[in-house]
Amino acid sequence: MAYSEKLIDHYENPRNIGSFDKAAEDVGTGLVGAPACGDVMKLQIKVGADGLIEDAKFKTFGCGSAIASSSLVTEWVKGKTIDEAEAIKNTDIARHLALPPVKIHCSVLAEDAIKAAIADYRAKATKKAE
Amino acid sequence: MTAITQIRRNDQPIYLDYQATTPMDPRVLEAMMPYFTHKFGNSGSRSHAYGWEAEEGTEKARAQVAKLIGADEKEVIFTSGATESNNLAIRGVAEFYKDRKNHIITTVTEHKCVLDTCRHLEQQGFEVTYLPVQKDGLLDLDVLRAAITDKTVLVSVMAVNNEIGVIQPLAEIGRICRDRKVFFHTDAAQAAGKIPLDVEALNIDLMSISGHKIYGPKGIGALYVRRKPRVRLVPMIVGGGQERGFRSGTLPTPLCVGLGEAAEICMKEMDAEAKRLKKLQERMLTGLRAKLTDIVVNGDLEHRIPGNLNISFAYVEGESLMMGIKNLAVSSGSACTSASLEPSYVLRALGVEEDMAHTSLRIGLGRFTTEHEIDTAVDELVRHVNKLREMSPLWEMAQEGIDIKSIEWAAH
Amino acid sequence: MSAVTYLDHNATSPLRPAAFDAMVEAMRAGGNPSSVHGAGRRARAIVDRARREVASLVGARPSETIFTSGGTEANNLALSGAGRRRVLVSAVEHDSVRRAVSRAEILPVDGEGVLDLAALEAALSASVEPALVSVMLANNETGVLQPIAEIVRLARAAGALVHCDAIQGAGKVTVDLQALGVDYLSLSAHKLGGPPGVGALVVRHSAPFSPDRLGGGQESNRRAGTENVSGIAGFAAAAEAAKGGLDVTGFRDRLELSLVQIAAGAKIFGARAPRIANTTCISMPGVPAETQVMALDLAGVCISAGAACSSGKVQRSPVLLAMGVAAEEAACATRISLGWNTGPADIERLIIAWQDLYTRVRQSDISHSLSRARAA
């Protein structure tokens, strides 16, 4: 299996590894996957007062493609509105990293992670508004 | 024409996958060379010197293989490899005796080719019992005893497991089978040449051997078929009637010669090599344990060939680790199935949880492994395990004291 | 000229230097093609490249090409893998075809060894059960070529599948899967200057196939077992070198003409049928084949008394018997088979050795009959 240069770069030099305080109001956390399936992604977004995603962090247990997919999306979501971030499609991720067919599920997981993080953020925001 | 002068170039990764395949020993290649060039005859040609010369080569090789396992040379037949040997042994016996007996016993941790053959036989109406193994990977002899019925024709238990390297209690299994008048086949692809095997002492009736797992060539293997008491087989490949009718096809003389030479070298060097590998195995494990926590060796460490380690590096997914340790050629799971991304069925059979199975690496040491390579490998593994743990949400949770099993994970 | 003249290429052909080099390179690369790491991927690349090369020798697609341990396995695999219970084979097939299934129906050949097409047609229409027809391209003992395209036409009309054992033909004459139209095609490396222990079965995409050997999923689940990487590499290199075919017609004509001139009554079997040029099956009347082979061996010329298989005991050729050759005549037939490294000097040496033998036999015959005459 030959991996693309972009994928290898994200695997070897992953961007935005780390964690935010998941209790913080401006942080949305998505935790998707399962250890038994061989991948778990934790993706967090920090949303500014202007509604833009000002920072993102991830931690991933999974293969190189899973790590690269999550690293890539943390880069992509930064500076985007929540709605824009929500529009990121797994196919965009797969295409950008040239994922081999057996690894497409990694991009699906990354998309799920963004959506889960956004949902978490929104839930918090709604709760706060109430 | 060129010749092989060295095993590994400096720019190649350190090879630690000796259970997938072994590099050919230069002495083996040297023995084969003449049979590629001027001694190229067909050992079936009885009419000229080329044929006789080739036959001398194959017959010497047959004797060398026989000697390695304490057999008579008439009991050794050449095949194209251990997969064929396993297919032939199990199907051949099952089909020959099917009118009287129709039950086969094997274990869940056998090589795929044994399991697939057994499944095929089930479809043909045979009954197959797949015995579980214990947590250490070893067969419980009482479970075996209880499984044998008067319909049992064959027990097939591998000598050494290809993923976890554990050695099954062959002598005890052989005794049980002989007492119950059941044939005993053992897939010794990973065992022959590495641990002492004597078909008489162990009461083995059929044994599969592979060339490329013992520093010999690929495309050649052998099947030992006992003559007293006689084991009979329905052949799988028919035609010219070579190999006493058990296996037709022109014998590939150079490959036979290579297998024979490989067997002889293994036999001569077995004791010293086992000691040397044991030290390397210990060195690696000690090195890893000194610098990493949460690592688990899968399978029994004592009843194990010294050339194997199978380690789960908790919280680090095996494939991503493999991708990181670029200077090391290791495997996650067995070579045949490692492209399939499924967690190893062998580890699952040991009761290893799926999440831990995903973190396992198989590290195979062998004849050309050096202390320096082990040290380099330990450094590289430690560095990448630490790096990936820093990235791992599971490691983070574990550090925070969260029990991963307490979380409700969504399956996907 | 080498110390020995080897004219038994149909038994096995010496390894071509290009094949040897490719094998050494593959052995140096090492690795199990199923492994994911670099060593494994290099081995995989070698196998993939080789598959393209071998496939192209016979105009097949790489994905239609399954590597086996040799021609015998390929033939067995075709006959079992096609999944047809009714199997029709010609009477001159190799044992690995004739014995591959227990209930094969045998189709007769004519006096030249060519399949009796009328008999094929009759057999095909004798039952509604769809059959598999297996006929070789070129015979290993006589070199006689079968009318495969015609056989395929008849078989197709009856809904039958066709297997062609092209082991002796490939690399000597053009073999093209499309032109032949067969569903299965067997190849062997060591008959065309590759190493022994490797062969291939080509299975056309449209043809049914069920595997025989089960296990690790290699060869796209069609043939389990770790690939014989260096053997496969050698096979491909030999296939590439053999691509131009084997043009030994000049040698063949020279030797056949000479031998027939030397021995009055010498007979070349299958001479009136299309043949591959490398094979001559010829009798030296009154001289048992074993005597000829031994005498020629002493003179440094290797030929054979029949197919080189396992039989220590010499048996009459079923091929010649199927052609209606009388047993005593078949007993005097030997096979001379030329190959990629045969030179003019080899031909001359054979002719001289044959002449010497024939002269000696004649003289002793004459002296025997003279002494018998005196005694009487």
Image (spheres, helix red, strand yellow):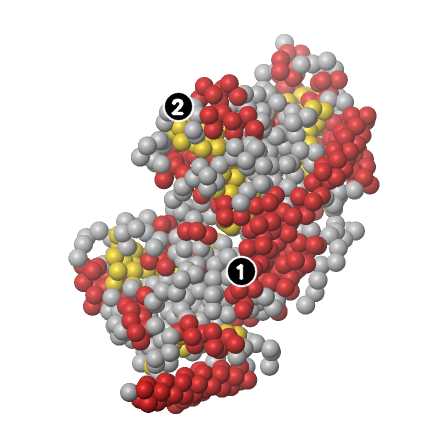
The mark that comes first in sequence, 2 or 1, is 1
Q: Is residue B116 left or right of residue B264?
A: left
Marks 2 and 1: same chain? yes
For image coordinates 75% across by 55% down, the residue present is: B6
Taking depth in this image into account, of C140 and C198 the one nearest to the observer is: C140
Residue C136 at x, y percent in the picture: 36, 65
On screen, residue B201 versus residue B276, left or right, reads: left
In this view, B170 is above or below C164: above
| Residue at image coords 43%, 30% | B182
Q: Which mark is residue B149?
A: 2
> Is A126 drawn above or below residue C237 in the view shown?
above
Residue at the limit of the structure toward the top, as seen here: A130
Tell me the chain of label 1: B
* Relative to B241, B61 lies left or right: right
Residue C80 seen in this snapshot:
yes
Which residue carries the number 1 mark?
B55
How much space separates mark 2 and mark 1, taking CA atoms? 43 Å
Q: Position of residue B189 (x, y in %)?
A: 58, 40
Callout 2 amino acid: Thr
Total marks in image:
2
* Mark 1 crowd level (few <14, some 14–19, many ≥20, 10 Å Cα): many
Q: Secondary structure at mark 2?
A: loop
Depth order, front residue of B288/C6: C6
Give the quarter of the image for residue C117.
bottom left
